[in-house]
């Protein structure tokens, strides 16, 4: 699964996922960035995903996927520097 510009091997993690196998299988082999972020995964989940890292996308693929992501994004993300009260 792709998250941002990197490739993660989710094969073994699928069965351990606390949020159901299916949601990961739906994104397997694809870009899961939007789905992963929309859930608002915890810091722990962000740590876990790092352990599954196997590769980075080459520049051309990263560029293509970023453009596709921007084109399909419905709501712009709040910059992390903005504190919501
Ligand atoms: C391989 C990457 C992923 C990792 C390491 C991961 C990890 C986790 C962890 C640790 C949790 C427990 C709650 C938390 O700590 O935030 C969780 C919950 C959840 N995840 Fe993931 N997840 C991944 C991908 C995804 C994807 C692609 C989806 C797609 C929608 C997803 C949907 C969910 C949902 C719906 C929950 C349940 C939230 C709840 O009921 O609290 N996850 N995930």
Image: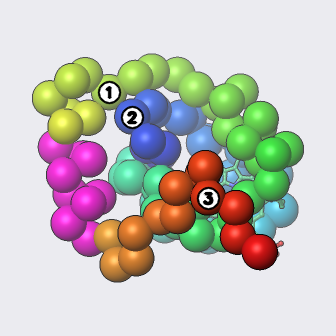
Q: Secondary structure at mark 2?
A: loop
Relative placement, left or right, of 73 versus 9 is left
Q: Which region is colored magenta?
A: 64-72
Q: Nearer the viewer, mark 3 or mark 2?
A: 3
Q: Which x, y percent locates residue 2? A: 43, 43
Q: Which one is nearer the viewer's eye here, 10 or 38?
A: 38
Q: Which mark is residue 82?
A: 3
Q: Is residue 74 above or below residue 48?
A: below
Estimate how packed mark 1 is, as few (under 14), some (14 to 19) or many (20 or more) residues with alpha carbons within 10 Å. some
Residue matched to label 1: 57
Q: Secondary structure at mark 1?
A: loop
Quarter holding the C terminus is: bottom right
Q: Which x, y percent locates residue 60? A: 14, 29
Q: Which one is nearer the viewer's eye here, 45 or 27?
A: 45
Q: Is residue 24 above or below residue 66?
A: below
- Earlier in the chain: of badge 3 and badge 2, it is 2
Is mark 2 in CB contact (under 8 Å) with mark 1? Answer: yes
Q: Which one is nearer the viewer's eye here, 47 or 8?
A: 47
Q: Residue at x 26, y 35 (%)?
A: 62
Q: Secondary structure at mark 3?
A: loop
Instruction: Report ligand 1 position as a quadrant.
Output: bottom right
Relative placement, left or right, of 7 versus 13 is left
Residue matched to label 2: 5
Relative placement, left or right, of 33 versus 51 is left
Q: Quadrant of residue 40?
A: bottom right
User: Magenta: predominant secondary structure element?
Assistant: helix
- Badge count: 3
Q: Is residue 26 magenta?
A: no
């Amino acid at each position: 699964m792709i998250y941002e510009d990197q490739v993660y091997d989710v094969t073994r993690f699928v069965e351990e996922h606390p949020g159901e196998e299916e949601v990961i299988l739906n994104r397997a082999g694809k870009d899961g960035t939007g789905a992963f972020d929309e859930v608002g995964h915890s810091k722990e989940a962000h740590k876990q995903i790092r352990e599954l890292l196997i590769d980075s996308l080459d520049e051309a693929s990263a560029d293509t996927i970023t453009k596709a992501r921007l084109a399909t994004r419905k709501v712009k993300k709040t910059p992390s520097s903005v504190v919501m009260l």
